[in-house]
Amino acid sequence: MGRGKIVIRRIDNSTSRQVTFSKRRNGLLKKAKELSILCDAEVGLIIFSSTGKLYDFASTSMKSVIDRYNKLKEEHYHLLHPTSEIKFWQREAASLRQQLQYLQESHRQLLGEELSGLSIKDLQNLENQLEMSLKGVRMKKEQALTEEIKELNLKGSLIHQENIELHKKINLVRQENAELHKKVYGPGGISEENRVGHITHGINKEYDLHAPINLELSQPQNEKSDTPDLMKLGLQLH
């Protein structure tokens, strides 16, 4: 004998109602899970019992399901009610205009303008804000200057090292020249070698390779006429 048709209405007996709720709740949760797996559907199920207990199931997460539901519902509502969308954007535009006006007023106050309507407390807050801003600017400036000084010191060290290398190369070239003079002139080139060595020694003595070289422009000297000297030489030749 088959089961009779059950009338869908509230069960008066509390015990029977609780048993029926428990059985059908488990069946509903099972069906929701099977639907999400078999059909690759995103399913969210929320159940509150008559006593206020919560039972839920979500194939991904309940938050993502609810967010997706609210987004699609809002889009569907705007499509069905275009006038409501216009009002929504009008409210957004009004809110943005109000924010822009507030920012413009704050900017003018920071520049010291339109301060007549401010109270003592507002002026004190504005002063504190300016002092904090000035402190931040000074800290950033000091940091930038410190980094620039470090970079200049590094460049100076590199240039000083290059100067030392150049002096070493100059001395090496002078020594090679002395050797060449000795080979070319033979024993008679000793005076020339001594002259070159004397110049090299003078350069090494005059310039400290371990100290940076400072180049300075000398003042131009007034040119004197060489006519008297030439005349004296001419007279001597005669």
Image: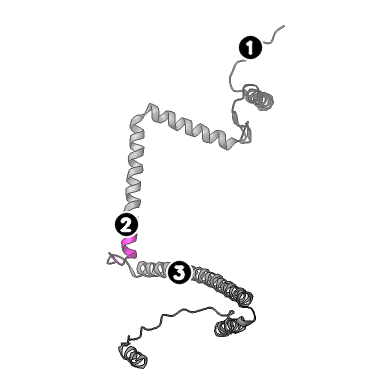
What kind of residue is marked 2?
Gln
On screen, residue 147 above or below 238: above
Q: Nearer the viewer, mark 3 or mark 2?
A: 3
On screen, residue 147 above or below 59: below
User: x, y percentage for residue 47?
Assistant: 60, 31
Q: Residue at x 48, y 30 (%)?
A: 72
The magenta stretch spans which residues? Answer: 101-114
User: In the rendered structure, which disc, 3 or 2, sits on the residue that comes first in sequence?
Assistant: 2
Mark 3–mark 2 distance (CA, rounded to whole Å) = 27 Å
Q: Are marks 1 and 3 in contact (CB under 8 Å)?
A: no
What kind of element bears circle 2?
helix
The quarter of the displayed image where residue 115 is located: bottom left
Check disc 2 and report the residue beneath it: 104
Q: Nearer the viewer, mark 1 or mark 3?
A: 3
Check disc 3 and report the residue beneath it: 141
User: x, y percentage for residue 100?
Assistant: 33, 52
135 or 68: which is nearer to us?
135
Instruction: Give the quarter of the figure containing the C terminus.
Output: bottom left
Check disc 1 and report the residue beneath it: 5
